[in-house]
Image (tube, grey):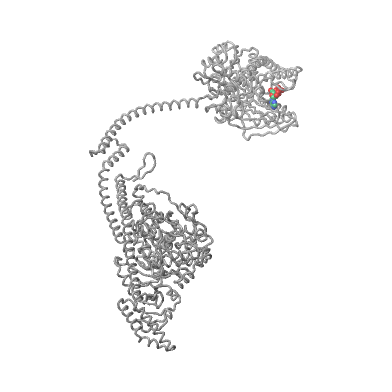
Amino acid sequence: MSKTPASGHKVMFTHIRTKMLVYFSILFISTFLSIEIINIFGLPFTAFKGDYAVEKSKSFKNLNLIADLEKEQILKWLDKIKTDSMTIAESPMIINQIKTAKQDIKELQAAKPEDDDIWNEFSKRPSYIILLQQLAIAKKAYKIYKSLQIIDSETHQILVSTDRNELGKTAYNDPALRQKMKYDDIHITPHIHDPGQSSGALTLDIHKSITDNRTHLAYLDLHIVSEKLLKQILLSGEGLGVTGETLIVDENARPLAPLKYKYTENRIRSKPALLASEGQESFMITTDYRGIEVLAAYRYIPLTSSFGWGMVVKQDREEIMSPIYTKIKHSIYLTLAGVIALAVFTAMIARNLSRPIVQMSRTARAIKDGDLSARVLVDTGDEVGILAETFNSMIQQIQDQNADLEQKVKDRTTRLDLANTELIASEERFRAIFEQAAVGVAQIDSKTGTYCRVNRKYCEITGYSPEELQRISLAEITHQDNIEIDRRQMNDLLEGRIREFSHEKQIAHKNSSVIWVNVTISPMWKAGADPDYHIEVLEDITAAKELEAQLLHAHKMEAVGQLAGGVAHEFNNILTAIINNIYLMQKKTDSDGPISGHIKSVMELSNNAARIAGELLTFSRKQKYAFSAISLNEIMQSSEKMLHHYIGADIDLQINFSDAALPVIADKPQIEQAIMNLATNARDAMPDGGTLCISTAQIEVDNAFAKANDLEKAGIYAVLCVTDTGKGISEINKKKVFEPFYTTKAVGEGTGLGLPIIYGIIKQHMGCITLKSTEGKGTTFCIYLPIKEQADKEAASISQSAQKGNAETILLAEDDESVRKSITTILESYNYKVLAASNGLDAIKLFEENIEDVKLVILDIVMPVMKGEEALQTIQGMKPDIHFIFTSGYMPKFSDKTKSINADIPFIAKPIIPDKFLMMISKMLKKQSTEK
Amino acid sequence: MIAIKRYIMNKPSALGIIIALITCFAAISCTKTETTETQHSSAINDLSTHPLYSTYDFGAKDNIIDLGSQPLGVPIGVISELMNRDNILKESLSTLGLKLRSHPFFKGGDINYFLKNGKLDIALAGDMPMIAAAATGKVIVLSLAKQQFSSLIARDSIPVNELKGKKIGNAFGSSAHYSLLLALASADMTEKDVTLVKMKVSEMPDALANGNIDAFVAWEPTPTIALTKYKDFNVIHRSINTSYLYVTKDFAERHPRAAQLIAAAQIRAMRWMDESEENLLKASELQLKTSQKFSGYPPVLKTATNAALIKNGLSAITAAPFIPEEYYKENGRLHREFIFIENLGKLPEESTWENAHRSFDRNILIQIMKDPAGFRINEYDYNLI
Ligand SMILES: Nc1ncnc2c1ncn2[C@@H]1O[C@H](COP(=O)(O)OP(=O)(O)OP(=O)(O)O)[C@@H](O)[C@H]1O
Ligand SMILES: [Mg+2]
């Protein structure tokens, strides 16, 4: 089980009980072991040696003791032999007998120099017998001698020997021995007859000088079978246990007595044997000839000054140390048992001691996990008990405080949440106000004039993204003309002369178009210091500005139109009378008569005058139009010839017709004139030649376009565009070209009426004209005319010829007397009864009087006392099914309020063309009769 | 179990350290007093300023024979003692117009120093100084004067290998020094494994007893003195030491007869002591007196004990003190010793075994033995007062 404490550092969790168990076990084991180990091996740096050292020391002492004893024994034994030899050698009797014996031999040799048998002889001599007797006694007494001999020191012949066969033989064949014996009193020579065999092979020769008064007589040789004796000494040693052994080696480390264990080599190669044979004595732990570890004591046994034997007393280490091992074994068992017992006790004690602590830790964990109601149920009556009690009361306090704290936190959190929500809402609100404002809002750094923050609308107006705006300043997008005034205003603002400013100015849109804006700049005030930021409010007023300009234009046109229209109207009235009179004159005179030519010429001139007046009216839209249903393509086709004639050879004329029929309600000559005017302008714009392209098309116009170009409604329009590749029109001049008398041409070349007339014509046709031009590239004028479906019928009806009436009564209201008279005359000449009134009121009176007879009412719209429309209403009130025709020198505006009332009333414009008028009357009357 | 046994047997000291760690016993104060003097070099110290030796009168008169003796060694101390008292020697030398003068030294190495610089003519010293002198080719070795053990003594009966790192009292350049080297070699150690403390043999037993040293090596009678005085001491190693009578070549050439007379005096002394127990005890007594005078220590050994030591030291030497040819033959005792100390770098540069080998001259002794009467080796006239 592992736990992660607050620190995050991972620590193995171990139960306190386990810890106690482990710690105490370690303590016990180490203590026990220490005691045992100290007991066995002693305490370092102190005099306390420990069993091992003591036992070892004891063993060494024992070995040394045995070694010393055995060495002493051997030395004693050697001493004894020496003493034996001395006893014999120094016996006066023997010395005397040797003297005699030597004398005897000399005598025998002198007698029989070549005879070997002198020794036989000699053996019978008393000297020999006595000597042999003596030697035999010695041999018998000591039992260690193989043989005893007396050797002549001069001839080295064996004088006497216990071994009869040796008699007379030459001994001391080794010259070194002879040399030694010259000066040495006693000498010992070992013999190993068969080194391979370790049993019974060793003999030791003792050579003793026999002197008489310091003169060498002979040597006494004692041949000893030392093996038997050594064996006796070596094996008699006690206290060497089962494995103990004493071995004796010569100076070449050859064993002198049989070994206890099997060994095949000649030399003992173990260290103590070698060292001992070299003259050293000590003891050590080493391996013996078997290769087994032993404790060994070794000694040197000097035999002569030049050689000695080595002796090793050894015992297997295992045997010596076995009590120690047993002790160690017992100690380990005891320790283990003790440790186990103590571990059990410790476990019990640990359990007992740790129980309350474990319980406390459990409770603490429960508390940590959130259960503050957990309590320690410990009543041990000791420090732990006090701890538990304190712990419990602490937890109680914590629990109380916690509850209190929790409530407080809860309250505060609720309040904080509320405030926070409000704050967020407020923030959102203000952000929304800022972001979603319908005007552009920007926060501007007062010092640098750069944008800090802008809203969506601001970006929309300027075309820049917020990021882009942060890189530019307000001045950079302000129109050249406005910079100076902006700067002045800003200065005033910063210096406190004004609190804010607001003005209209032009700025550059990102797409490089110029837009009009209303800018309001106010500082973001802060207490006691200059403002760091300014708030800029930006309103796009381009549309309003354009509207304003259009309105202005319209008003201007309206004024000019009024003037021109008024003049033309007066002329028209006069001309109507003139033409009517001439018409009558023509009818009443013979066509081949002398004045008919004059009349005809006057008629033509009058018509010309009427045309000019008409032109003025066209512009002022007071012209009476002759509308008919016609295809725009058709108009274009009929103009084509004339166009070629107009534009000349330098210019390449291209005409593209739309596949669609493009039916329109139009006054053909007017439209033709418009086309001609446009073509003329195009030609004039291309003095060095170019391309003139005229095309027609059917285009669906949307609401935006309709609204922008003052069109009645959206829908399908017939469009005719005239495009040239001429010099183009500058941006500023684009507005001016439609003004009357605006021209860039030289005096006499242009009057500046061409485009105004077109404007008037197109307006009259409920259409519009657009202009696109790039200076140096060319210009395109397009005229839009509404497509009319029912145009066919109307056109058809117009084509009918005038018919005479059946004396039907027609009420005519016309304020202009000349017109009234001429119309009356014409109508009467066509067999109609005419009731003429000079104003609306008169007309009503007349109608009232002749209500049954009047079949048709013709009303001039503009009349004094009562206008035509008022009269119409009254008359309609009296007789609803009566038919009317309106006349007027003005073209009625369809947008006028009157239009809705009189939408169904046919209208005929002045100057009235009699054929057309008569045709309309007969049609109306026919219609009336069929209705009945 | 076997493994533990092996471990315990092989690593008792390592285990000891482990125990020391486990038990956390505070190290009992055992601060070593680093007053030890170690000497590993073979160079002989300059003894011209020696407090005692510098007082000696080596007077460069041609008629005086200077003998370097060692009163603190048996049996050579007793031999020189008897030589000094030998009226026959005195008489025979005087017929040559010569006179013997003896100077006591603490060890053979010191004698070599004065032998080398010509102050001494004759030396009685152990094998190691003898070889050191002989290897230079400047001396002639006349006779064997002792064959006895030198002993390495410690307080406890411990094997030699347990002396590792311990302080050992040593007389540098002495034959006991060689014994120590042999002892260390027997436990596969060298001088580097122990700390040698330079001291006089007479100071050693007390130094060991009061813990200044952990062991010491010395020739007789010091070991016997120590074991007599301090019963709990233990001999932990012994090795055969020999002592020799040797003279400078220069002296032997100038006074060949005198050299023979000196050698004859040794034989006479040995034979006189061998003659009777009484003689031996007398010699022992006289030697103890001189020894006490020289060392300043009262005698620890009884006259009889000392006599036994003398007898023991001479026991292997028979009637004639010939140096056994086995000693200096190839791989003989002395040859081995030469190689051993040469390998340790303890010999002067010019030393060779050939020099040493040539130094052993048997003829002088042979001539004496051939003419016992002429050299009066069986006559005795000692001034025993
Ligand atoms: N296609 C065109 N290319 C270039 N400039 C043009 C074009 N059409 C008209 N203009 C400019 O507009 C001005 C006004 O033209 P407008 O037709 O009204 O008068 P005018 O051509 O000058 O005289 P006129 O009364 O003889 O037509 C012209 O003087 C000319 O500067
Ligand atoms: Mg024009």
Q: Where residue A206 sits in the image (x, y, percent)?
A: 38, 75
Q: Nearer the viewer, residue A548 or B6?
A: B6
Return the residue found at the far right: A594
- Is residue A585 toward the left or the right of residue A406 in the image? right
Q: Is residue A749 above or below residue A311?
A: above
> Relative to A654, does residue A897 appear above or below in the rendering?
above
- Residue A730 in the image: x percent, y percent? 67, 25
Q: Quadrant of ligand 1?
A: top right
In the displayed structure, does residue B358 sit left or right of residue A162?
right
Residue A762 is drawn in which quadrant? top right
One can see residue A677 in this view: no
Occupied quadrant, residue A686: top right
**Residue closer to the observer: B337 or A671:** B337
Q: How many numbered badges does the structure rendering display?
A: 0
- Please, is residue A135 above or below residue A764 in the view? below
Q: Position of residue B213 (x, y in %)?
A: 39, 53
In the shown orientation, is residue A44 left or right of residue A381? right
Q: Position of residue B26 (x, y in %)?
A: 35, 47
Q: Nearer the viewer, residue B107 or A307?
A: B107
Can residue A716 be seen here? yes
Q: Observer-nearest residue: A791 or A241?
A: A241
